[in-house]
Amino acid sequence: MSTIKCNELVYIRRQVPDLAKAKSFLTDFGLISVAETADAIYFRGTDAAPHCYIIHEGPLSLLGFAFQAKNESDLHVLAAATGRQVEQIDEPGGGMRLRLQEPNGYAVDVVYGIEAREPINIERQAVNTGRRPLARAGTVLRLPQGQPTPVKRIAHVVLGTPIVSETAEWFAQTLGFVASDEVFGHGGSEHIASFLRVDKGDDYVDHHAFLPMRSATAGLHHVSFEAQDIDAVMADHHFLKSRGYDQLWGVGRHLLGSQLFDYWNDPFGHAHEHWADSDRLNASAPIGVWDVKEGLTNQWGDPPSDRFRNNVKP
């Protein structure tokens, strides 16, 4: 039984050698700058979370990420179980956090009480389909031109690690994560990846909020954001291409999770994903078990390159 069962991913925290370059990329990617302090810049999406991405200036590194506690009492339960202290957050939005360290050495904040903002309303036209051919009858589709589409929210983090099983077990035992799919190699003897979702009982949640994936060294593989819709993924693919950024992989549709995806590296080589249309599962979903040759494939689009698979940076 886990110590607590947390809610979804709240933010990622990174350190970058050039804040201006990072801000330019993240803005072009569709994040919205909402606050700047002496040593950090905070970004949000259009959902109510006050920020979902924090960058500090310094040598390139992943500093950590945060998940939401269901209530304040869970923070204190977790504090008692881990010997850590609950502290006030001295950052925009306030709130409380308990800072833990996962098996690869990265900080995992469990937070509660960060003040929400009003969601940002983004009007998107309905799309006609074969089954709903009159969804926008009488109107013509016109997408915004020459600008990024704001992302909705941060969705998941993929962490490269040489200790997949230990990492997955820590998140399951400490924060209550459950596996949606497990991927193995070498006839089942090597644990390649664990697609972990949060446990909210009968409520449906993203196929995965955290994914440890085997690599020679520990580091960030990619951070992922939900786009407004499939049109946003495609339009922003071409917008980022026009800005000269480094495309890593896409566009395609994953098998596990089923997202329509597009991956881009920031100026420092950390990968960022736009996606739309994920699988949503609840606690009754069975665990899928896959061989790596089947599980880490996509339903359409080019297969992943070695550059994508090995794109892990501390």
Image (tube, grey):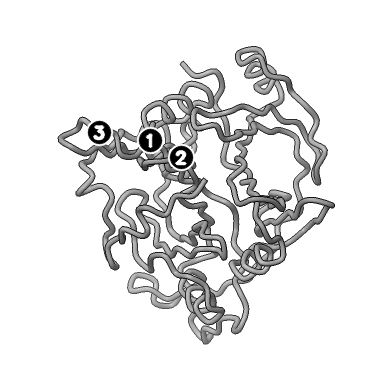
Residue at the (41%, 44%) spot, across then down: 207
The tag earlier along the polypeptide, 1 or 2, is 1
Q: Which percent across, then down, holds residue 252?
A: 34, 65
The tag earlier along the polypeptide, 1 or 3, is 1
Name the residue type under label 3. Glu
Q: Which percent across, then down, holds residue 255?
A: 29, 53
Residues marked 1 and 3 touching at CB (< 8 Å)? no
Q: CA distance from mark 1 to mark 2?
A: 6 Å
Q: Nearer the viewer's eye, disc 1 or disc 3? A: 1
Residues marked 1 and 2 touching at CB (< 8 Å)? yes
Residue located beneath label 2 in the image = 218
Name the residue type under label 1. Pro
Q: Which percent across, then down, holds residue 73?
A: 69, 20
Residue at the (58%, 45%) spot, across then down: 62
Residues marked 2 and 3 touching at CB (< 8 Å)? no
* Label 1: how many Cα within 10 Å (few below 14, some 14–19, many 20+): some
Residue located beneath label 3 in the image = 190
Residue located beneath label 1 in the image = 162
Labels in figure, total: 3
Mark 1 falls on what kind of element? loop
